[in-house]
Image: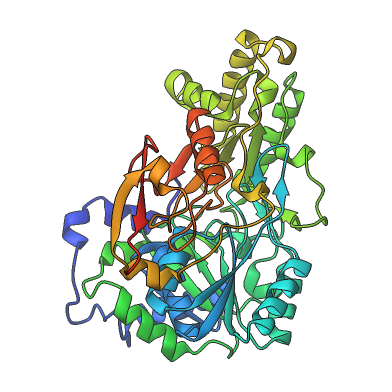
Amino acid sequence: MSVLPEFREVMASPLRHDLTELPGLDYLSSPTGAIKEAQELAAAAFGADATWFLVNGTTVGIQAAVLATCGPADALILARNCHLAAFSAMALAGCHPIYVMPVQDENLGIAHGITPDALRRAFSNASSDGRHVGAVLVVCPTYFGITSDIAQLASICHEHGAPLLVDEAHGGHFAFHASFPAHALAQGADVTIQSTHKVLSSLGQSSMLHVKGDRVSHECISRALQTLQSSSPSYLLLASLDAARAHAQLPDTFQEPLDAAAAARQLLRELPGSGLLDDHIQTGTDGIHGVDPLRLTLVANSLGMSGFALDDLLQREFGVCAEMSTDKTVVFALGPGSRMEHVRQLAAALSSIRGRSRSPSQQRSQPPLQSAAARSSLPEMRLTPREAFFARTARVSAHEAVGRICAELLCPYPPGVPAVVPGELLTTDVIEMLRQVASGGGKVAGAADSSLETFAVILEAS
């Protein structure tokens, strides 16, 4: 990872700089000095009216944004593929969820963005139920680098008097080069939360929250963060956020990574049998407005193996670490520090693997993994996330869990869309789908029992 030279000097002696809220170092919860100045510089760089530094990751930013906009009587419209933090945020706020399913790529098992029409239907459903919508929360870009039509989504939200909150965890770099998709604030979003440590060069666990316009109260954001964040923040994390902002603003920070990404696409397309997500999608269609050029999503099946197997092989034999893998894809993330030599290393590794892999006609035919996002309907919601959080629970066998209210958030990867969340009904279909994903090499996040032989359910009051 490439970082600002001044910050590299700080990290040469981290214990010396692992300080606390001493005089002259300012206070994160109510900044008036150095932290205030650093946040104002960040706001100007990212096109925001105000920026808050986060030392509990994007998780705390999502929670604060929801707490600042949604009360117990309100509804939160959210994409079903939102991060786990959105569900804990609803438990904290006590609001009522109205889910919008993202567009699903049935062939690759990938969830994209939500469509403007789907968002309009969600507002209509809220109106029919007599619910006031406190905010709308969407993910943009996705883990695969796909962006949504934020401008249209923001327009719809504002027509209904609701702010648009964007989990922009993987898009912190969008504001810094013309080759990137437009960042969400520039398209009308009211709040964005970015994992500055993912593509930019801050330390892990450090993120930023940006607000633009007057639809979301700055005071409410500050109060929520004072409630949720540590009162003893790491000044190494804070310094890394300031350094990441300054590094991103340098004129040449992203040119080499962009050149490397373009070269990688060309080399991978020249590799016999290889395939890229870019070749499977069409921008400007439902749920797909653009693509982050620094994300490379390889269709692994074209190399004669699953994405999970390819990811494992690349790490074990070639020292190439992917960002993530699914049954059919492997995702590579480039950023500051990515060089042409890394591209050549990846291309050589894939060429070697291609030389020993079976041709598609020789592969054993396997049924595609069923996708949570591909289901036509969501599980029945019996309790709100807050009600489910405070309910008494028990762990029972899978057979006994059928027809009971789930107490766990169970999210299969692929595609990263929760199959069931706390307060929803567990069904035979859901349990079978989760087991199929796990047996096919996928993961079920949130399952305390990885064997999926038992599930946590809610004990209903007698």
Residue 372 versus residue 24: which sits nearer the camera? 372
Residue drawn 38% across the image and 67% down it: 388
Measured as percent of width and height from the top left, residue 233 is found at 25, 69
Residue drawn 45% across the image and 59% down it: 84
Residue drawn 68% across the image and 76% down it: 125
Measured as percent of width and height from the top left, residue 5 is found at 39, 54
Regarding residue 323, the answer to whether it shows in the image is no
Residue 196 versus residue 276: which sits nearer the camera? 276
- From the viewer's perspective, is residue 240 above or below residue 190? above
* Left or right of residue 114: residue 235: left
Residue 460 versus residue 369: which sits nearer the camera? 460
Measured as percent of width and height from the top left, residue 68 is found at 46, 83
Q: How is the image coloured?
A: rainbow
Picture quarter containing residue 458? bottom left
- From the viewer's perspective, is residue 175 above or below residue 141? below
Picture quarter containing residue 107? top right
Residue drawn 34% across the image and 65% down it: 56
Residue 258 versus residue 270: which sits nearer the camera? 270
